Image (tube, rainbow, N blue to C red):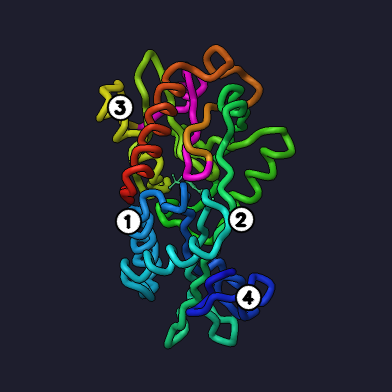
């Protein structure tokens, strides 16, 4: 079942207008929320980021936070899997014609569905993944979780063809993020992360990794990271709701550090998994 504009419908019956501005212009925003044991992870934070994305594109939020939470929980309840990945998007609706300015009035399209959550398994974490680098040719508002994902589609396909999982993006010689993840660097025992700005998505996983560093006394710094520092890193990780903390062991065919996942990736992954298990056991939605 899929939630579409106030109704739960079988996915084969879910119909969106050909004039939907999500189809025509990518005019909308989205969220991906991991669900463990039927509990959405950091739901309040995902809803807050959704609200920020909607505000940034000037689209009135169709639901207050408590209603979003109720809808998301209803979608989760309909699904058979315990661990899920909830996808939701809001577009500026279908005006019945194609023109760029906002339609007056606007009737947004709200779509929510959930699929099985597949996170990296122990073997994948132990092996790590390969990545390519690329110039960050996206726009200047990458803090908005926008439906305009053509650059991501092209970069991830470029990676796939090269047997890689992610693309590490540099803008003017500085690390921004991954095509669909945030990137952390480890050098000399210090975890480094680029500061939030309009050039990267403020990741929910990124926040949690930094919170865990603070809580457990892991040396870390949030500061701009130059491209050579990435290429000379001891460890490189990608983080996202679906990949969690995944070590990158090869960048552009060159080994990262020793060419295998490093000790800080293992430490942070243990802390992350413990946190997840504790939150789920206690039934908190933090
Ligand atoms: N992507 N940066 C980009 C560009 C992303 O697309 C994502 C997530 C992240 C990590 O954010 P979070 O930790 O909140 O998942 C960073 C999702 C998973 C996607 O588009 O499928």
Q: In what element is the residue under mark 3?
A: strand
Q: Is residue 78 left or right of residue 53?
A: right
Picture residue at 44% right of the left edge, 83% below the top? 106
Picture residue at 53% right of the left edge, 53% below the top? 85
What separation in Å lies between label 4 and label 3 (alpha carbons)?
A: 46 Å
What separation in Å lies between label 3 and label 1 (alpha carbons)?
A: 26 Å
**Residue under numbered circle 3:** 221
Residue 241: x and y in percent read 47, 45
Picture residue at 67% right of the left edge, 38% below the top? 159
**Circle 3 crowding by C-alpha within 10 Å: few under 14, some 14–19, many from 20:** some
Say which label, 3 or 1, has the lower sequence index. 1
Asked if disc 2 is less than 8 Å from ligand 1, the answer is no
Say which label, 4 or 2, has the lower sequence index. 4
Residue 13: x and y in percent read 66, 77
Q: Which mark is residue 44?
A: 1
What separation in Å lies between label 2 and label 1 (alpha carbons)?
A: 28 Å
Say which label, 3 or 2, has the lower sequence index. 2
């Amino acid at each position: 079942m899929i939630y579409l504009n106030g109704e739960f419908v079988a996915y084969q019956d879910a119909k969106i207008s050909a004039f939907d501005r999500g189809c025509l212009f990518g005019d909308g925003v989205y969220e991906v929320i991991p669900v463990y044991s039927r509990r959405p992870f950091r739901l309040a934070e995902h809803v807050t980021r959704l609200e920020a994305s909607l505000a940034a594109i000037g689209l009135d939020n169709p639901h207050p936070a408590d209603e979003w939470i109720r809808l998301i929980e209803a979608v989760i309840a309909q699904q058979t899997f315990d661990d899920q990945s909830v996808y939701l998007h809001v577009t500026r609706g279908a005006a019945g014609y194609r023109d760029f300015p906002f339609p007056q009035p606007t009737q947004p399209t709200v779509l929510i569905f959930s699929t099985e959550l597949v996170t990296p398994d122990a073997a994948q974490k132990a092996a790590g993944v390969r990545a390519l680098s690329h110039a960050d040719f996206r726009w200047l508002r990458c803090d908005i979780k926008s439906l305009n994902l053509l650059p991501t589609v092209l970069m991830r396909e470029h990676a796939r063809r090269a047997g890689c999982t992610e693309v590490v993006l540099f803008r003017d010689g500085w690390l921004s993020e991954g095509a669909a993840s945030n990137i952390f660097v480890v050098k000399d025992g210090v975890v480094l992360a680029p500061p939030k700005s309009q050039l990267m998505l403020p990741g929910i996983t990124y926040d949690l990794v930094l919170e865990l560093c603070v809580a457990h006394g892991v040396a870390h710094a949030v500061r701009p990271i130059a491209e050579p520092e990435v290429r000379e890193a001891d460890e490189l990780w990608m983080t996202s709701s679906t990949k969690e903390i995944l070590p990158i062991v090869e960048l552009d065919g060159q080994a990262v550090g020793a060419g295998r996942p490093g000790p800080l990736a293992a430490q942070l992954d243990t802390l992350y998994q413990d946190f997840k298990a504790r939150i789920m056991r206690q039934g908190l939605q933090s």
